[in-house]
Image: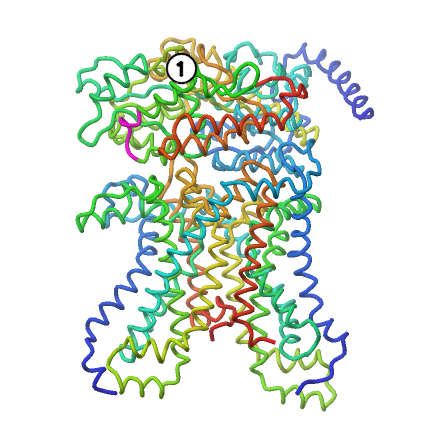
Amino acid sequence: MKFKTEVSAIALAATASLGLAGQATAWSLEEAAKPYAGTELEVLFLDRPGYNAAIKMLPEFEAATGIKVNYTTVPYENALGEQVRDFVAGGDLDIALIDLVWMGNFAENGWVVPSETFTKNPALADPDLDMADFFPLILDAFGSWNGVNYGLPFDNYSGLLFYNKCMLEAAGFDKPPATWQEVMDVYGPALTKDGKYAYALQSKRNETQSADSFARFLWPFGGSFLNAEFRSNLMSAESQAGLQFRQDLMKFMPEGIVAYDHAETVNAFAQGDVAMITEWSAFYSTVVSPETSKVADCVAIAPEPTGPAGRKPALGGFSLAVASQADEAEQAAGWLFIQWVTSKANAGKYLEMGGVPGRQSAYADPALAETYKFIPALVESWKEGVPEFRPRFAEWPAITEIVQEWGTKMMLGEVSIEEGSRVIGEKMEAVLAEAGYYDGKKPLAQ
Amino acid sequence: MSFPVRRRTIAAFLGPAVFALVIVGIAPLLFAVWKSLHYFNLTKLAQQRFVGLDNYIFVLTDPVFWQAMGRTALLFAVAVPVQIALGLMIALVLHRPGLTFWKTLTRLSLVLPMATTYAVVGLLAQVMLNQKYGVVNQMLGWIGIDAINFIGDPTNAFIAVILWDIWQWTPFVALVLLAGLSTVPPEIEEAAQLETKSHWTVLRHVQLPFLIPSLVAVLILRTADTLKLFDMPFTMTRGGPGSATEFIAVLIERVGNRQFDIGLASAQSIIMLAITIALARAYIRFFYREVR
Amino acid sequence: MAAPIQRRNLAGEAILLTLICLFCIFPFYWMVTTSLKTQVVALESPPVWWFTPTLANYWEVLFEDKVGVALINSIIVAVCTTSLAVILGTPAAYALARFEFRGKTDLWFWFITNRFVSPVVLAFPVFLISRELGLRDTHLALILMYLTFTLPIVIWICTDQFRSIPRELDEAAMLEGASQFRIFRSICLPLAMPGVAVSSILAFIFSWNELLFAYILAPKNAKTAPAMAVTFMEGYDVPYGKIMATSTLIVIPVLIFALLASKHLVRGLTMGAVK
């Protein structure tokens, strides 16, 4: 340990002097990457638009740096497990792909390196990095834990309301619903007829159930998972109202909604069977492409409806962080890649390729909103989000399993809302007690 | 008559296989027993500690575990009788003389389902049973039945798993019973057929006694395979919707792989293994008696 | 005897047989045809039966999605574990068939029990052990773990086979002074070849089809084809054509082997309980 500190002190000194020399010639990716040419980086990707965009951009990075990025595509449902097993086993992943709800877990286990390690190193830090340009909400939620930043926002989502303008107009609506109450009282009854449904809420028993379905109806109604003392807040009147609302809204959704994952939901919308969905911004390209969507011309986008407690839309997304199990060259090369792919300079290209950058500057050009209709709603949503939409502590993987199980049971009518909430609350508190939140062993961070 | 063989020779012949099975079969099991006495979560290795029998107490009183066990038992109780009834019917048809070419062809096609990769069987189910794009619902439409939401409804999903299990394993049962039928001495069968025209009487009094070993084999193997059943529901429904198709192996995988609680998953596996071995012992004692 | 056959409705029987065949084969037909559909055609509702086939899905999964590599991994693992099982299993089977010794029944029972142990019981401890030994994500880890079911198959079927070889052959060789090992190697093993072949085919099929060990122990470099097929189930977009193309590629080899061994498949699956 001591040896390591000494070495890094020397390294730091060395790079500092290099940095001084570098300032004269200005920082460039090519120069910074020179010592790491030939390094191979291992990372997990998902089969989603943001990753496909990055894959298309990879050749440029590889040509400029000589660093090779080997990505393995896995389903989201396997991504956490594969990474946990790899990090526990000291495997070969060099970059961690972190869903915001895994942040606490990865940070507390020391699997990822704080970004400060690299931003302080002038040989590696791009002078144009400009961390302040990331939307503060997502930099905080996707990449940071307990005030320390680890990852840079890479694949960024906000929940948005996708609606079928044509269907709404045919039913006499000239604008989308502004509140959930309107969906329930006005839009729902008017749009659910002739085998079509007003709304579909992806609720499959996996992360979709807890993130897209359960949490979506807690926050706008003033509810939350936990109160300030980290006790269950699910029995509060607000949480109960939200969950009851979700249950009542099911009469305007297709049957078997608990088996709907993103694919089924987006598809129901794209086939014109459902008038409105609340989905991640990442689906924009799917629903507006004529190849995958029958309603491409009718798609319009708005922020999610508000509840009594405001908008508080679903928040989700991934950051990339350097893995601490990687060796020094891999760490440096990994940082260069992360910094490059999330950079201000590349944000425009990333957007064009189908990704959703987390850079404020990328959306500054008002002309862009013409091409990408989701932009205004997205920017709006990222101003009103809650970072702890789903708690991000290390216990989330255990808690989400509980929510998934009992959340679907509620929707299926196998338990009442109250009973289900009580069980989730009890089990959730048991997990938190085990983790040591109630006896002061752990700070109450989520 | 047997040879006097030196112990060393026996050891040389058996040693390598026994050693290999101890290493890959017994050693991990002992390790699992050890871990099951710990709080051992992959995402919280720092909190690892000895907890004695806590995990076992939790499992034994955990309704989720017993519900998964119950579900597994229900699957067995519904699917296996159907498989035996259909399988017996197919075996009896194949056993009759005549139509040799057709029967050879049928026998060959019966081989296919049971050899198919179980994970692929589940994927096939996803494609064929889809409410909207699935060919099964299209066919139901032809005979005037409305599309059924096989994967999305808890009861239907359970039924779909049963149907798919029946598809994959009825041919197996049929072939096993057919092999059993061929052990009936032809002269006895012919004599009986001359005496009565009732197929049922022949089956009940002449063929059935010869079928007993095959039936027991079917019961043993279907019990083991149902307890193991993981691939097909995993690729078809992932245990859902809700926990409608969360069979015991699917549950253990979820606890170990998604909750990362290896200690708890180990305790669950050990309990399941105890149940399996108890059943296997009972069956094997009964059935493999002739083996010495 | 002749009369009842004539009276029977042969046509009815033929129809019944045809239905049974269709019942067994139809899912495979659907799998193959879906694999030849583009995504747009695959998502037609109701499903279409006639369309212009395309091999694009195969091209994509084999080369872009690395299913080709996974198939090679599957072959490596299945062939190695089968060979190892035969090398270790045949002498043991010979010993069980020929020698008398104390504890033989218990040993037999233990071998049989392995057929009943669910992989989920072993998978997690083996993951932890393989991590300690540096065997994670290697072919070797899978080859060794698959011995838990391939070795019992070989032992069971070959024991049966050795029993059917007349002991007189052994005795004659013994009188000529041949060693026990020589008798096994040069006299009995060649005669037991049919059993060895059948058990090899079965061991191959079982290892080829295995998912759980592969899924947990071999995430990347040694990933086998069934584990690969599972990775297409991303919730964002379900590419039916690609999934079915991968499935077809996985299933075809085992079906060929199964048909080759069709006469012995039942004996193998019931571990010799039914001949």
Instruction: Please tell me whether residue A365 is drawn above or below residue A326 in the rendered image.
Output: above
| Relative to B248, B150 lies left or right | left
Q: Quadrant of residue C235?
A: top left
Is B189 within the magenta?
Answer: no
* Residue B59 in view, yes or no: yes
- Nearest the viewer among C175 and A288 is C175
Task: Verify whether residue A252 appears in magenta.
Answer: yes
Q: Is residue C56 something that shows in the picture? A: no
Packing grade of label 1 (10 A; few <14, some 14-19, many >=20) is many
Q: Image quadrant of residue A369?
A: top left
Query: In the rendering, at what x and y percent does residue C141 appear?
Result: 63, 51
In this rendering, would A438 be left or right of A190?
right
Residue pictured at 62% horizontal, 71% vertical:
C90
Asked whether C181 or B26 is in front, the reply is B26
Residue carrying label 1: A220
In this view, the residue in front, B8 or C91, is B8
Colour convention of the picture: rainbow
* Residue at left offset 62%, top offset 37%: A86
In the visual, does B113 lie left or right of C228?
left
Name the element at disc 1: helix
**Which residue lies at the image location 22% right of the left edge and 29% below the top edge?**
A196
* Vertical order, C55 against A289 (above or below): below
Point out the stretch of residues depicted in magenta.
A249-255
Residue A289: x and y, percent? Answer: 31, 28
